[in-house]
């Protein structure tokens, strides 16, 4: 075992340990609303029967609440675990930790195959501890599992490309593992289809080497088979999910509406997040330099039948280009920072290359060691600074309101929650209900005026809403919309009031 391999194992252990900090924390951080929905789907499987093809959320009121989602294998597995250990936050969170841990050796090997052990060690360090990756790597969400499967699939696809025809068993194994990993990656997170960019890069380079021409890649039966295995399951599932969204209230398809080109200010905000809490300024700068100096890295020896390693480096450029295009076109969707997660392994690779490049210019071994220690220390400090913000319990008032609702309302009560579209209240209340406002409440939940709020509330009351809850994030409505407050006071009674929330019991509808 080489020193680099031992270092990689140590870094992997530390990376997993960091993600286990607060593993049973309630879903009250800045991403509470996304995790709340996934957790609700898992609990509804557990409580309502394991109907895999019909995932349910909590905010459909008196309706079943079937929605179109990614392939819900993660909440389904969590529901199975609930049968064994009960409903706990760590059950959902640990899935991301496990898949992240599984990706680490394959990421290290992928980079080592192209750039060598030193670059791979640095790349693994940056990939393991980027602030956004730390946060996402312990969330009950499909993003890190999908990214991990993409990395595993890319590694085995490269192995399949490089292995000779004489190694038929190993080559077939690499082919099927790559296809299955990529298929699952896209199934559980559709934007992971962007992994097709580096895959296409490798495929075109492999089959455009003389005497073959570029068009040979499109005539290659193995590539068509790979594409079918990787894409057909997703086409079938997302077609089904779309039909579910059309058929059932609230007619919601997760991720819909994200394809919008936004203003320059919008993209500047995204870039600021990428530079700081996604990558840290150090990795951003090192990665940017790496994009330029990658071509100067020494080549690994190869024969003429496979892509030369220097050519293989292009797959990361292709992946980066695909990500930039994705951020521009899916501008509105990229308001969610986790959509930029694939930038972490990409930037980590280029940053690792820069470290090797800089090291090659330093002749003194002592100076190299000092440079490495300084860089690692500065990066670690910046990670601490930027990662802290992800852990802030910004949704704690919603959880508190939910727990109070659970204590003071009947189990079959329907709740209208002024929650800005965050299902945390309903999840911890273990009640069904609606976002208030009902229409577009998950995107733009503030009423235009008192009249709109009154009409919306009365519509929900007529459909069975028995309680209305405000949190500290929305209690200002009661001051701003004076006529609405007067209407609410005349048609309800205050059940509980704290600085964190207010709960009203709505008067029954007169028959």
Image: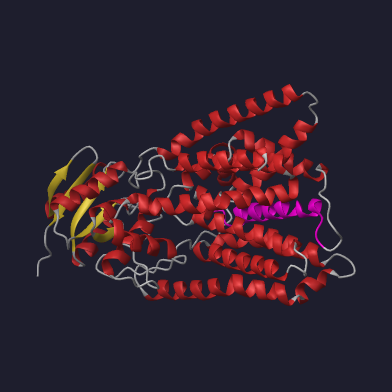
At horizontal 52% and vertical 76% (from top left) the residue drawn is 236
Q: Depth check: 167 or 441 in front?
A: 167
Residue 265 coordinates in the image, percent (x, y): 57, 43
Hey, which quadrant is residue 501 in on the image? top left
- In-image side of 132 versus 34 (left or right): right
Hey, which quadrant is residue 55 in on the image? bottom left
* Image quarter in which the N terminus is found: top right
Query: Could one spot residue 20 in this view of the protein?
Result: yes
Q: Depth check: 189 or 129 in front?
A: 129
Farthest residue to the left: give it.
511
* Image quarter in which the C terminus is found: bottom left
Residue 163 coordinates in the image, percent (x, y): 75, 63
Position of 267 relative to 382 (above/below):
below
In magenta segment, residue 277: no
Figure coloring = secondary structure
Residue 507 coordinates in the image, percent (x, y): 11, 58
Position of 359 relative to 263 (above/below):
above
At horizontal 57% and vertical 42% (from top left) the residue drawn is 9
Position of 76 relative to 86 (above/below):
below
Hey, which quadrant is residue 175 in on the image? bottom right
Q: Depth check: 284 or 367 in front?
A: 367
Query: Could one spot residue 444 in this view of the protein?
Result: no
At horizontal 80% and vertical 59% (from top left) the residue drawn is 307
Q: Which residues are magenta?
A: 306-332
Farthest residue to the front: give it.
1
Residue 467 coordinates in the image, percent (x, y): 18, 56
The overriding secondary structure of the stretch rendered in magenta is helix
In magenta segment, residue 322: yes
Farthest residue to the right: give it.
211
């Amino acid at each position: 075992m080489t020193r680099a391999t031992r270092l990689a194992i140590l870094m992997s252990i530390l990376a997993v340990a960091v993600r286990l900090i607060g593993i049973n924390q309630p879903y009250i951080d800045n991403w509470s609303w996304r995790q709340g929905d996934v957790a609700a789907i898992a609990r509804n499987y557990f409580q309502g029967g394991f109907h895999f093809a019909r995932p349910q959320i909590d905010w459909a009121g008196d309706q079943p609440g079937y929605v179109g989602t990614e392939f819900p294998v993660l909440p389904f597995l969590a529901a199975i675990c609930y049968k064994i250990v009960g409903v706990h936050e760590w059950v959902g969170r640990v899935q991301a930790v496990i898949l992240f841990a599984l990706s680490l050796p394959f990421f290290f090997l992928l980079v080592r195959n192209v750039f060598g052990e030193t670059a791979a060690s640095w790349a693994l360090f940056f990939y393991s501890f980027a602030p956004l990756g730390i946060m996402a790597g312990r969330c009950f969400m499909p993003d890190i599992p999908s990214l991990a499967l993409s990395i595993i699939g890319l590694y085995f696809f490269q192995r399949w490309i490089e292995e000779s025809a004489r190694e038929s068993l190993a080559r077939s194994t690499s082919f099927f593992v790559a296809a299955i990993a990529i298929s699952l990656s896209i199934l559980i997170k559709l934007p992971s289809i962007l992994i097709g960019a580096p895959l296409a890069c490798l495929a075109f380079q492999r089959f455009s080497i003389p005497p073959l021409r570029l068009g040979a890649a499109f005539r290659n039966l193995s590539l068509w088979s790979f594409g079918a295995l990787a894409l057909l399951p997703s086409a079938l599932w997302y077609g089904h999910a779309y039909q579910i969204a059309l058929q059932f209230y609230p007619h919601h398809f997760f991720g819909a509406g994200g394809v919008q080109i936004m203003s320059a200010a919008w993209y500047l905000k995204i870039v600021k997040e990428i530079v700081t809490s996604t990558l840290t300024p150090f990795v951003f700068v090192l990665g940017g330099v790496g994009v330029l100096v990658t071509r100067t890295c020494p080549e690994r020896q190869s024969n003429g039948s496979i892509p030369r390693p220097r050519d293989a480096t292009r797959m990361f450029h292709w992946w980066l280009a695909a990500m930039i295009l994705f951020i521009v076109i899916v501008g509105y969707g990229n308001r969610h920072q986790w959509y930029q997660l694939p930038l972490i392994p990409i930037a980590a690779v280029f940053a690792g290359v820069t470290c090797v490049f800089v090291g090659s210019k330093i002749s003194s071994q002592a100076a190299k060691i000092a440079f490495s220690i300084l860089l690692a220390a500065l990066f670690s400090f910046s990670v601490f600074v930027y990662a802290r913000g992800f852990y802030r319990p910004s949704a704690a008032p919603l959880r508190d309101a939910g727990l109070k609702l659970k204590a003071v309302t009947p189990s079959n009560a329907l709740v209208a929650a002024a929650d800005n579209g965050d299902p945390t209240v309903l999840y911890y209340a273990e009640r069904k209900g609606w976002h208030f406002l009902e229409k577009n409440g998950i995107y733009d939940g503030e009423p235009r005026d008192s009249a709109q709020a009154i009409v919306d509330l009365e519509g929900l009351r007529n459909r069975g809403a028995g309680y209305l809850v405000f949190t500290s994030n929305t209690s200002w409505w009661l001051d701003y919309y004076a006529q609405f407050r007067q209407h609410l006071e005349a048609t309800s009674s205050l059940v509980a009031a704290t600085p964190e929330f207010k709960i009203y019991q709505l008067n029954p509808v007169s028959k």
